[in-house]
Image: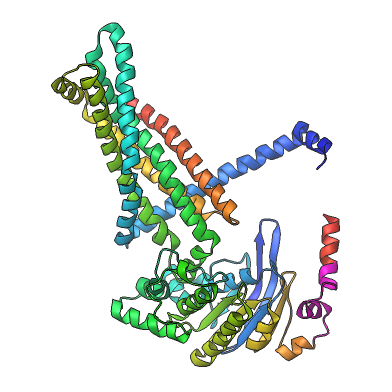
Amino acid sequence: MTHWQNMKKWVSVRSWLKEFGRLSLDIFQGAGGIALLFRDTCSLLLEGKIRWKATISQMNKIGVTSLPLVFLTALFTGMVLALQSAYQLRLFAAEKFTSDLISVSLCRELGPVLTAMVVAGRVGASIAAELGTMKVTEQIDALKALATNPIRYLVIPRFIAALFMLFILTIYADCIGMFGGYLISVFKLGMSSHMYIKRGIDALVVKDVVTGLIKAFFFGGFISIVGCYFGFNARGGAEGVGRATMLAVVVSLILVISSDGLFSAIFYFF
Amino acid sequence: MIQIQGIHKWFGQNHVLQGVDLTIKEGETLVIIGRSGCGKSVLLKHIIGILEPEEGDIKIDGRSVRTMPQGEQDQFRLQLGMLFQGAALFDSLTVRENVGFSLYEHTKLSEEVISQKVREKLGLVGLRDIENLMPASLSGGMKKRVGLARAICSEPKIILYDEPTTGLDPINADVINDLILRMQEQLKVISIVVTHDMTSAYKVADRIAMLYDGKIIGVGTPDEIKNSKDPIIQQFITGSARGPITDQEKKETELL
């Protein structure tokens, strides 16, 4: 394409509309595909016949191996939260509220969202890459040829594992985050250990913990279904798998952040 | 008997199969030849039910797979075995788990019985003592043979081979050709082989069909195909760079 043709493409209204149309089609096709995969997964799940061995192996892959990364993320988040909030609260001589702030913000928001982001980056990408490679090397076709439903064989174990492991990882992240805050509050800000723990627990109500965990449950579902969808739809060779992996992470993160906003609004009013 | 009736398939704007009609008789080996990307593998995937046609139907022993309920479809599909182009072995499973996959998934046989059957099928394709290896540690020829052992493990009535000799050295390619013939003799199955390797086609075929432009343009015994007057078939089987196939492609490129 010549330089002039290239320029023409950028100023042409028609090419902008074409791009917009193509993008809209891609978005609706993706949304529809993800919804259909979710529907098929749920309907097969209700039929039973869950492959527990594979599910436990996925729980190990998704949950246990994510523990170190979630530990680091939550620990530093808790520490930074303690430092930054103390910095502001000091202006009002209200440093003792640091532990209230840490426990509530971690349980309601930061615990589930940061855990979901870490898992989306680590596990969502790995699911999409693994299934994408299986797709381009015809292993998914081979499953169908061997009369095995790929959703039952591949998606359901990952879906169940992600649902439960996100739930557990979030509880773990909440605890580690509060421990991070404890380290700073007790050893740097001079708060007593007893006061930090007591205030932190007293500040929490059941709703704070439950809403955070409900979110985690949904985030786990989003990450696994989106990873599986993009893996199943990978085309071409290595480039196709790379693109599927990238899309899985991006779409998972968008879904986690946007649904978090929606959940926060719902939980605020109800 | 397999009856393929007026199959049409589109991928977006690309009309890959444009009304394929073909009948494969009991116990015969049919080889489908055609250029790369002409839809041979797509046709094979329609027969095994991985893809569904937009128009037309495929009947196996007079029954259409499309109209069957899901459970029955799965049982029916086990009567077909397929060797994929790249063997498509499951990376995360051992050779034993790969070969015995259909038995692990669809039967309640004990581990010992399955292991015995896996050894037997591996023996049929000339392999032994590799049950505990992972697919990554096998050579290309071995992968194809393990893929074939997996395809025959459920004792199918029909075996489909998708470019079985592609990517193999001539000696390994001939080993696979011999295996196709041996499967035919020992198991008395219907075999459909998709290939563009004419040496392999002449060696294993009872009949050869040529797929061109989304349609079957000629069917006959290897001798009939060799002596065909059709210039398209002649260009393909002689492997000439000049002829109606390349002329047509040139015209299409100029139009674009």
Span highlighted in magenta in the image: B228-247
Q: Is residue B239 magenta?
A: yes
Is residue B2 visible to the viewer in this orientation of the structure?
no
Where residue B142 sits in the image (x, y, percent)? 50, 76
Residue at 26%, 25% in the rendered image: A181
Q: Is residue B142 magenta?
A: no
In front here: B28 or A39?
B28
Where residue A96 sits in the image (x, y, percent)? 22, 15
Colouring convention used in this rendered image of the protein: rainbow
| Relative height, residue B163 to residue A155 (above, below) | below
| Relative height, residue A166 to residue B155 (above, below) | above
Q: Is residue A74 left or right of residue B35?
A: left
| Relative height, residue B225 to residue A222 (above, below) | below
Pick out the residue farthest to the left. Answer: A194
Could you tell me which quadrant the N terminus of chain A lies in?
top right
Pick out the residue farthest to the top. Answer: A92
Name the main secondary structure of what is drawn in magenta.
helix
